[in-house]
Amino acid sequence: MELRRMRDDDICLIESWLKQDYIAKWFGDYTDWMNEINGRHKEYSFIHHFVVEEENQPIGFCQYYDYCMLPLDDIDLKEPKGTYGIDYMIGDEKRLGKGIGKYLVRLICDKILEENDDVVQIVADPTIEEEKTNIASIKVLEANQFYYDQKSQLYKKIITD
């Protein structure tokens, strides 16, 4: 499995995944995601989008971003410079529950470390609403050394030298 930079010809596939019920229940309104993807060369250029491939076949999507670049109304608490956020999904429903998510999170974390010198922590938020908790995603994060931070309500992975 590997990550490759998202291309324009991936957009329709990613949109189709975001519309699937098993993804939409965790990702929310797909139009918000598509606005970010379509604005990736402009106002959302701080978000780095990737397609996950297995044997040259797209099976998922992930992204990382400089958390401090998020609009202030999107974040409740300030995080230190060098904080990067991640989002990820397995687009092919047949591949759910097979350990791919665990490896995918490791790949995107490695990509952040490879492309950035200032990383102090990586964060993720596997809940779309207070009453909806994505247990599978939480297990994937915990398997990758993320812990739940009560104050920020984010899952965090501290990066040490």
Image (tube, rainbow, N blue to C red):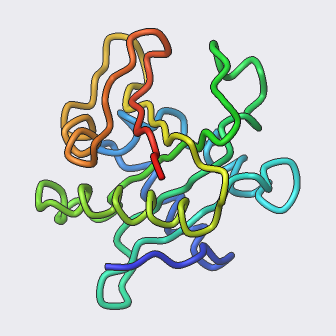
Instruction: Give whichever of 161, 65 is nearer the camera.
Output: 161
The answer to whether 71 appears left or right of 75 in the picture is right
The quadrant of the image that shows the N terminus is bottom left
Q: Which residue is drawn at 49% across and 42% down?
A: 122
The answer to whether 12 appears left or right of 45 in the picture is left
The answer to whether 117 appears left or right of 112 in the picture is right
Instruction: Give whichever of 2, 33 is nearer the camera.
Output: 2
> Compared to 135, does 60 lie above or below?
below
Q: Which residue lies furthest to the right in this view?
A: 42
Q: Residue at x 30, y 82 (%)?
A: 54
The answer to whether 119 appears left or right of 61 in the picture is right
- Residue 72 is situated, as x and y percent measured from the top left of the image, at 77, 21
Q: Residue at x 23, y 45 (%)?
A: 140
- Residue 55 is situated, as x and y percent measured from the top left of the image, at 30, 90
Q: Residue furthest bottom?
A: 56
> Compared to 84, does 25 lie above or below?
above
Q: Which residue lies furthest to the left in this view?
A: 98
- Residue 41 is situated, as x and y percent measured from the top left of the image, at 83, 62
Q: Which residue is drawn at 61% across and 39% down?
A: 83
The quadrant in which residue 107 appears is: bottom left
Q: Which residue lies furthest to the front in this view?
A: 161
